[in-house]
């Protein structure tokens, strides 16, 4: 049985946000741009508990059914229309990423790394 498609995410690390009228308008309008693509906020302006290193700014995570939906939302005319309201009033980085499928285990990834490393050492192609 195949694993279901992983959820995908739009992740933003926003810094130096000017909480002005443009940001308020952006916040009022963003859900309307997300709805057609199944986008839902998973994390929005949380109180962060930093355990290692330093984290500048705030974190926003929006969940999508697929990476295609995340791309379609970001590139949509509706979102592109409101995007300058945020980018003119904050610094930051935005990423679109695939999540892992149900049942994913980090040990499986470690096994692939070991297989690849062993294959390189022996001169045979990895799996």
Image: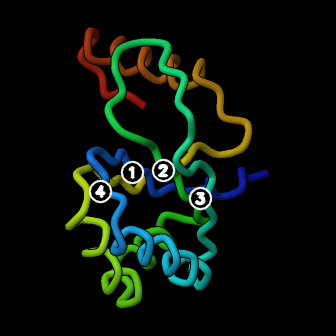
Indicate the secondary structure of the residue bearing disc 2.
Answer: strand
Q: How far is mark 3 from mark 1, CA to CA?
A: 12 Å
Residue 51: percent from left, percent from top: 49, 13
Q: How far is mark 2 from mark 4, CA to CA?
A: 16 Å
Q: Earlier in the sequence, mark 2 or mark 4?
A: 4
Q: Earlier in the sequence, mark 4 or mark 3?
A: 4
Q: Nearer the viewer, residue 112 or 87?
A: 87
Q: How far is mark 4 from mark 1, CA to CA?
A: 16 Å
The quadrant holding residue 85 is bottom left
Q: Nearer the viewer, mark 3 or mark 1?
A: 1
Q: Which residue is mark 1?
A: 12
Mark 4: few/some/many CA within 10 Å (<14, 14-19, 20+) = few
Q: Earlier in the sequence, mark 2 or mark 1?
A: 1
Indicate the secondary structure of the residue bearing disc 4.
Answer: loop
Q: Nearer the viewer, mark 4 or mark 3?
A: 4
Q: Residue at x 72, y 53 (%)?
A: 2
Q: Residue at x 31, y 82 (%)?
A: 80
Q: Nearer the viewer, mark 4 or mark 1?
A: 4
Residue 127: percent from left, percent from top: 43, 31
The quadrant holding residue 89 is bottom left
Q: Is residue 53 above or below residue 89?
A: above
Q: Is residue 40 above or below residue 8?
A: below
Indicate the secondary structure of the residue bearing disc 3.
Answer: strand
The residue positioned farthest toward the bottom in the image shown: 77
Q: Which residue is mark 4?
A: 18
Q: Earlier in the sequence, mark 4 or mark 1?
A: 1
Indicate the secondary structure of the residue bearing disc 1.
Answer: strand
Mark seen at residue 60:
2
The quadrant holding residue 84 is bottom left
């Amino acid at each position: 049985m195949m694993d279901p498609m992983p959820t995908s995410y739009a992740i933003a690390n926003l810094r130096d946000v000017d909480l002005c009228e443009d940001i308020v308008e952006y916040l009022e309008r963003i859900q309307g741009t997300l709805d057609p693509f199944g986008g839902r906020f998973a994390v929005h302006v949380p109180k962060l508990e930093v355990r290692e290193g330093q984290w500048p700014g705030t974190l926003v995570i929006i969940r999508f059914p697929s990476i295609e939906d995340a791309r379609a939302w970001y590139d949509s005319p509706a979102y592109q229309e409101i995007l300058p309201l945020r980018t003119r009033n904050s610094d930051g980085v935005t990423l679109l990423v695939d999540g892992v499928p149900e049942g994913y285990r980090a040990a499986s990834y470690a096994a692939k790394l070991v297989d690849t490393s062993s294959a390189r050492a022996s001169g045979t192609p990895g799996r």
